[in-house]
Amino acid sequence: MLARRKAMTKERSERIKTVLSHRQHDLTVVLENVHDPHNISAVMRSCDSVGIQEIYVLNTRISKHAKFGKKSSASAANWLTIHQFDNTEECFTRLQGRCKYIFATHLGQESKSLYEIDLTAPVALVFGNEHSGVTEEALAFCNGNFIIPQVGMVQSLNISVACAVSLYEAFRQRQQKGYYNESRLPEGERMILEEKWGLEEES
């Protein structure tokens, strides 16, 4: 006989509603050919922290990830909507339907500083492979490139750190515009997530 799940407490219900009220439906992240699942899980934790609901995992040169590291994500994957693709065009066509801008972390001739781009618009941020970065195929779908200014001898950051820095700049810009003061998720999506999260085990 199956054990019954304990009824959700009032505190738990209020926590879910509060978290969902801060979710940003028009801010997302794309991880292209990121090899280490622990890097992906660390990115997921950052996404959850700043209110991102959906992320895109694109694998065209490595195998699809079966699971993500629980230790570094602290089960963040339970609270995100994760889209996995193995076709670049299909992934970015989906993104273009929901984002006004797609920016990639890439050092190019016309790359802008992270702090010069508007992250309050509907935007997707693309992060590439740990060794080779974002592919040319993916760059062709992007509106522009950005870099994180650095003044050290080592001119690179771990992908999960680079993503966290970028997302907290988005958080800063959006917070200043009051984007976290009221719910930005479509009502139907919010209700579906509220019901789904109510069935998840507490983390």
Image (spheres, rainbow, N blue to C red):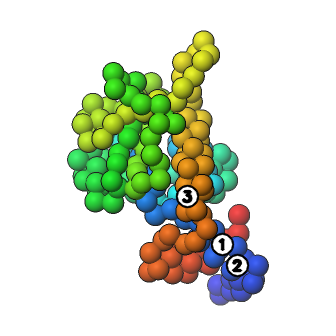
Q: Which amino acid type corresponds to the residue marked 3 in the rendered image? A: Lys
Pointer 1 residue: 18
Q: Which of marks 3 and 1 is nearer the N terminus?
A: 1
Residue 135 x/y as whole percent: 32, 31
Pointer 2 residue: 14
Q: Which of 24 and 82 is in front in this view?
A: 24
The 10 Å Cα crowd at callout 1, few under 14, some 14 to 19, many 20 or more, is few
Q: Distance between the residues labelled 3 and 1?
A: 19 Å
Q: Is residue 56 above or below residue 98?
A: above
Residue 34 x/y as whole percent: 45, 37
The number of discs equals 3
Pointer 3 residue: 177
Residue drawn 38% across and 41% down? 103
The 10 Å Cα crowd at callout 3, few under 14, some 14 to 19, many 20 or more, is few
Residue 193 x/y as whole percent: 52, 74
Residue 171 x/y as whole percent: 58, 51
Q: Is mark 1 on a helix, strand or loop?
A: helix
Q: Is mark 3 on a helix, strand or loop?
A: loop
Labels 2 & 1 near each other (Cβ < 8 A): yes
Q: Distance between the residues labelled 3 and 2?
A: 25 Å
Q: Earlier in the sequence, mark 3 or mark 2?
A: 2
